[in-house]
Amino acid sequence: MNVNEVISYIKTGSTKSVCVDRRLLDRYPGIVRDIVIKGNNRLHLEFNTYGYDEGGLIIELLYEDFDALISALEKYLHSNIIEWDNITKSGFYPKIMDGVDYDLSGRHLKQELRNDLIDIPSGWNKKVVLPDYWADIASGKIDV
């Protein structure tokens, strides 16, 4: 990818965003993490149960400007923007192995959210946990 492609998807794409990384995480087996760049210098880290594309945890990071967002993401992914894939375009979805304990993995993700242990990019100005259910877990309103 390149900066112009990212900007083009944000300005003209049907979702006004572009997914630049999608992977299964060893730390949370059965959870797929998408990294989505959105308008207004927002970055979403979306954590969904394998096979589902909504309802999971979204961590929204707001950056001072687009350059700061890209720089933080390059550091986080340990790769330059030209090495990123346009998942929005390719539709790539990882394959999962059998035998995943989704309940255990979901509890682990919730506990780490509650304890602010989820690995996220740095340099953001504001962090928001979405939707309300997950925000309530993060704030301690819902037990895990």
Image (tube, grey):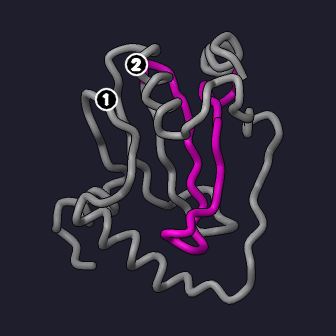
Pinpoint residue 21: horizontal percent, then vertical percent.
Answer: 64, 43
Quarter of the image for residue 79 reads top right
Please count the marks in the image.
2
Amino acid identity at mark 1: Gly
Residue at the front extreme, as displayed: 78
Quarter of the image for residue 72 reads top left
Which residue is the site of mark 1?
123
Q: Is residue 99 visible?
A: yes
Pinpoint residue 13: horizontal percent, then vertical percent.
Answer: 70, 23
Pinpoint residue 95: horizontal percent, then vertical percent.
Answer: 78, 66
The answer to whether residue 1 is left or right of residue 114 is right
In the rendered structure, which segment of residues is drawn in magenta?
13-41
What residue appears at the point 25 percent right and 58 percent down from the top-left corner? 116
Say whether marks 2 and 1 touch (CB < 8 Å). Answer: yes
Amino acid identity at mark 2: Ala
Q: Quadrant of the N terminus?
A: top right
Q: Which mark is residue 114?
A: none
What residue appears at the point 50 percent right and 71 percent down from the top-left corner? 28
Residue 113: within the magenta? no
Compare residues 79 and 46 and report the one nearer the observer: 79
Q: Is residue 105 above or below residue 49?
A: below
Q: Is residue 12 visible?
A: no
Q: Is residue 132 above or below residue 45?
A: below
Crowding at mark 1 (Cα within 10 Å: few <14, some 14-19, many 20+):
some
Which residue is the site of mark 2?
68
Pinpoint residue 32: horizontal percent, then vertical percent.
Answer: 60, 60
